[in-house]
Amino acid sequence: MRWWDIDPVLELEKDLFPEDAWSRGMFWSELAHARGSGATRRYLVAEEGDRIVGYAGLAVSADLGDIQTIAVARHLQGTGLGGRLLTELLRAATAFECAEVMLECRVDNLPAQKLYERFGFVPIGFRRGYYQPGNVDALVMRLTDPTTSVQGTESNG
């Protein structure tokens, strides 16, 4: 993801997450940490023609990766695009030498939870009222070895 992707990403963000969409400033802040030798972020977009139809981001601190976001346009949900974006984030986590990867997922987003479970993430707890302003709880999930998960996705096609 580059700065010129922010406007189309924001359109998708507002469509998919109307109650708790990220702001332009949040994306700018994340991208500021995604470049150079000291980069601690990896953000990417998926395109269909000249339209952005998905995006994902990873933040890293020491040997811990944290998936910040994964989003797929409604008409492409269930097509495997989310899995491809997740695979790329896990490859980035491996390149950053992360020992484990964490994420939060809305408790009411069962398709996303199933995706993460297929990649080896396991639930480890909850964050009450994490998603605001809707006051929706988050399920916290952890993957203890991102290299194994990436290798598994490559062998499964």
Image (cartoon, rainbow, N blue to C red):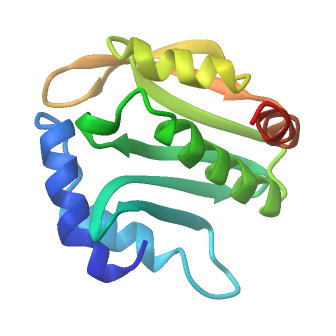
Quadrant of the image containing the C terminus: top right
Is 94 drawn above or below residue 49 in the view shown?
Answer: above
Quarter of the figure with residue 102: top right
For this orientation, the residue located farthest to the bottom is 36
- Residue 119 location, x and y as percent? 69, 27
Quadrant of the image containing the N terminus: bottom left
Residue 58 vs residue 74, the one in the foreground:
74
- Residue 10 location, x and y as percent? 19, 59
Is 150 drawn above or below residue 39 in the view shown?
Answer: above
- Residue 46 location, x and y as percent? 43, 59
Quarter of the figure with residue 152: top right
- Residue 28 location, x and y as percent? 32, 73
In-image side of 156 versus 6 (left or right): right
Residue at figure coordinates x 25%, y 17% from the top left: 136
In-image side of 76 versus 97 (left or right): left
The number of callouts visible is 0
Residue 7 vs residue 157, the one in the foreground:
157
Residue at figure coordinates x 59%, y 24% from the top left: 116
Is 130 drawn above or below residue 69 in the view shown?
Answer: above
Residue at figure coordinates x 56%, y 54% from the top left: 58
Quarter of the figure with residue 30: bottom left
